[in-house]
Image (cartoon, helix red, strand yellow):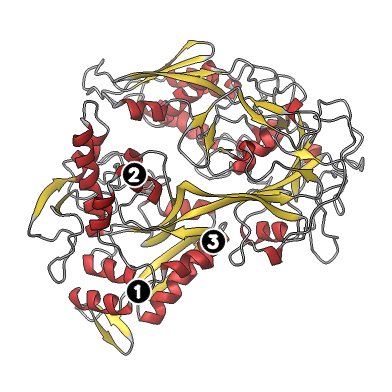
């Protein structure tokens, strides 16, 4: 690439004063071969493509990259681009597909269809405890070692020990590689003293089986020595010492790039691999297609260039056309617009993502957010249509139509129309009249244009956002502006990934008042759940007195300060509450509910359909009345990229039906659906 030295990168960045902006095609920066001389790897066409390289970006850099999943820092950003697809999730529904999925590819000149290999080939479930994952026996690490159930068990066992379970009474490691390619897992069966059995509903067991996301297993050369040391440890001090070494043992790019099956061979299992540190520069790194990988024959793209960039830097690369592929809709407003992109960067497809959206996450440990009427007032004061449009673009998301804590697709498939129509709907456009009334009912008053609490203290909260997400930043800025103009103070802060994730981690003390957070799960029981893990927001957070991941029915509040026992209105849509209502108001025509017991019962086996519906309705009524957080929109997703140098499926093609988590581009590239074009002709955008 222009400006890239023979070391695989340059000290300048695209668009800097002394360096020409790179184009998406051409020289791969690996010695000046132009990316067009390699002909020995499997390709999807015999015609010469205009490029053999595709460009992507990740929020990382070579000096901090660390593939160790147990390191305290979040420095593993590019790892999933070096690993196999764990599975395929339909973008429109919650259905999963696995290895052997066949996708029509009429855009390829000599492949009418391609078969995508994923890591998991299928699963079995035996309620109320057991499930079995079957791994594809073609999957290997880069050095040819099997990427199998044995490697996964070792990885997961190290994680179990690292999590502090070695000398914890009542705990067992509930996994076993039954065969090389089959991993048997089960819920706790009460097989040891102090262990309570955990029978679980079939749908929950099925959601644990056949993983689509998660950390790929590190090569056994790394995990096995730690596993043996953990097994040999005789006391807690020895376990702590091993854990200290584990979390500080860096798996750097240098370590990944070593070949030959040595003890240092820690590379991944994907179709693209890092072969040499000569391919790593300060600007980006270059991965090369492994011709032996089952997905390699699907594509004629032999190189994957990964740029080190996040936030504004990543957006600059998108706008300059340096990156060849990204997910998201191209809209008239928001981070990525038609006018901000070169003509050859165009949207391929767009859809309403049933399991993806955002929530304004609130921490009730803040004295203002503890008050029911204040939370309601803040929601009414904010123009959520503007938050969604300014952050994600008017055509890239839609505000939710039901306030159940679920996204609309789950709400409408779970509840009757009558039930949904009877629930209270909070204003989506700013309703200052409601907001002012609710603040007065909270005991607040306005002095000089500023809301003050009953003690005369100015009302304000902190609001944080990930700096790596322009949409989150712009959406949060809209919240801040709305509240500031209304007289409610907001201290707005943007943070890098590590600091932001630490601030909302219960193990780190929950150092936040409110933040923008993703929202969306495939199953209703994943929303109506007690979950203290920072990466997954449940209706109830974890326990402040024990394991932060799971709340206890005996706790008074969860980690976010929300009471475990609440009066929940009997009638859906009930809204009346005492003035100056605090965390737990006494309500008329209501039933006292232990929320942890309720969400736990949802996951238990044996519920009739009506019993399950009643549990769901209880959770919906609780959320609708108390608005512990506020789910405000869901995504209109899409995928866009370079149509000059690459050929893509038609917008309605089945090839666009799949993703890993939010990453449709993972499937397009790692599954081999992307195709380098043999010409540079393209239709200008409409």
Q: In what quadrant of the picture does the C terminus appear? A: bottom right
Q: Is residue 234 above or below residue 414?
A: above
Q: Secondary structure at mark 2?
A: helix
Q: Residue 527: which disc?
A: 2
Residue 43 visible in the snapshot: yes
- Above or below: residue 600 compared with residue 24: above
Using a 10 Å C-alpha cutoff, classify the residue at mark 3 as few (fewer than 14 neighbours), some (14 to 19) or many (20 or more): many
Question: How far across and how far down the image is residue 110, in percent?
Answer: 80, 29
Graded by Cα atoms within 10 Å as few (under 14), some (14 to 19) or many (20 or more), the crowding at tag 2 reads many
Q: Position of residue 134 (x, y in %)?
A: 50, 17
Q: Which residue is pictured at 18% across the width and 40% down the height? A: 553
Mark earlier in primary sequence (2, 1): 1
Quarter where residue 572 is shown: bottom left
Pick the front one: 365 or 361: 361
Secondary structure, mark 1, is: helix
In which quadrant of the rendered view does residue 272 lie? top right
Q: Position of residue 642 (x, y in %)?
A: 75, 50
**Label of residue 381 in the image:** 1
Marks 3/2: CA–CA distance: 23 Å
| x 72%, y 31%: residue | 273
**Residue drawn at (79%, 63%) of the image:** 15
**Residue 392: which numbered mark, if any?**
3
Q: Is residue 456 left or right of residue 506?
A: left
Rounded to the nearest whole Å, what is the CA distance between mark 2 and mark 1? Answer: 26 Å
């Amino acid at each position: 690439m222009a400006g890239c030295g023979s070391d695989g990168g340059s000290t300048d960045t695209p668009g800097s004063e002394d360096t020409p902006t790179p184009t998406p095609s051409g020289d791969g920066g690996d010695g000046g071969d132009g990316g067009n001389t390699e002909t020995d790897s499997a390709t999807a066409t015999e015609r010469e493509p205009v490029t053999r390289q595709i460009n992507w970006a990740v929020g990382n850099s070579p000096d901090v990259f660390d593939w160790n999943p147990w390191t305290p820092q979040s420095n593993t950003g590019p790892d999933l681009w070096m690993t196999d697809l764990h599975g395929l999730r339909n973008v429109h529904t919650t259905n999963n597909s696995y290895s052997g999925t066949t996708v029509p590819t009429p855009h390829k000149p000599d492949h009418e269809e391609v078969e995508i290999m994923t890591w998991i080939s299928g699963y079995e479930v035996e309620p109320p405890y057991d499930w079995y994952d079957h791994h594809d026996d073609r999957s290997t690490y880069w050095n040819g070692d099997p990427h199998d159930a044995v490697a996964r068990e070792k990885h997961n066992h190290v994680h179990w020990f690292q999590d502090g379970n070695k000398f914890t009474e009542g705990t067992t490691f509930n996994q076993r590689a039954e065969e090389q390619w089959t991993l048997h897992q089960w819920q706790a069966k009460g097989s040891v003293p102090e262990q309570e059995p955990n029978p679980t509903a079939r749908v929950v067991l099925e959601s644990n089986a056949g993983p689509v996301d998660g950390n790929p297993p590190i090569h056994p050369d790394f995990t096995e020595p730690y596993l043996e040391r953990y097994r040999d440890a005789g006391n807690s001090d020895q376990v702590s010492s091993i854990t200290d070494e584990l979390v500080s043992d860096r798996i750097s790019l240098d370590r990944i790039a070593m070949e030959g099956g040595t003890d240092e061979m820690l590379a991944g299992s994907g179709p693209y691999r890092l072969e040499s540190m000569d391919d790593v520069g300060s600007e980006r790194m270059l991965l090369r297609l492994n011709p032996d990988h089952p997905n390699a024959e699907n594509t004629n793209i032999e190189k994957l260039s990964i740029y080190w960039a996040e936030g504004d830097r990543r957006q600059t690369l998108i706008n300059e056309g340096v990156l060849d592929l990204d997910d998201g809709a191209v809209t008239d407003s928001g981070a990525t617009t038609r006018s901000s992109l070169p003509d050859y960067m165009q949207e391929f497809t767009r859809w309403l993502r049933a399991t993806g959206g955002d929530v304004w996450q609130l921490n009730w440990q803040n004295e203002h957010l503890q008050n029911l009427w204040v939370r309601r007032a803040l929601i009414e004061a904010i123009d959520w249509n503007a938050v969604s449009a300014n952050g994600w673009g008017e055509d890239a998301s839609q505000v939710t139509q039901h306030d159940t804590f679920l996204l609309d697709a789950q709400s409408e498939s779970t509840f009757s129309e009558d039930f949904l129509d009877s629930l209270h709907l909070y204003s989506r456009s700013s309703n200052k009249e409601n907001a002012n009334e609710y603040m007065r009912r909270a005991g607040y008053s306005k002095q000089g244009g500023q809301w003050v609490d009953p003690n005369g203290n100015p009302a304000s909260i902190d609001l944080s956002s990930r700096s790596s997400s322009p949409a989150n930043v712009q959406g949060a800025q809209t919240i801040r502006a709305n509240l500031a103009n209304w007289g409610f103070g907001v201290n707005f802060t943007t943070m890098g990934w590590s600091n932001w994730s630490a601030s909302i981690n219960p193990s780190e003390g929950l150092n936040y008042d409110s933040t923008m957070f993703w929202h969306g799960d495939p199953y209703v029981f994943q929303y109506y759940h007690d979950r203290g893990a920072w990466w997954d927001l449940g209706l109830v957070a974890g326990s402040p007195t024990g394991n932060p991941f799971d709340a206890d029915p005996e706790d008074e509040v969860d980690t976010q300060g929300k009471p475990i026992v609440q009066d929940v209105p009997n009638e859906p849509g009930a809204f009346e509450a005492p003035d100056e209502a605090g965390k737990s108001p006494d309500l008329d025509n209501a039933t006292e509910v232990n929320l942890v017991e309720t969400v736990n019962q949802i996951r238990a086996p044996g519920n009739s359909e009506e019993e399950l519906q009643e549990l769901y309705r209880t959770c919906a009524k609780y959320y609708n009345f108390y608005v512990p957080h506020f789910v405000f929109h869901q995504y209109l997703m899409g995928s866009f990229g370079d149509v000059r140098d690459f050929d893509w499926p038609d917008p309605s093609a089945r090839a666009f039906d799949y993703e890993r988590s939010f990453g449709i581009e993972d499937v397009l590239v790692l599954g081999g659906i992307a195709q380098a074009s043999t010409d540079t002709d393209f239709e200008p955008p409409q």
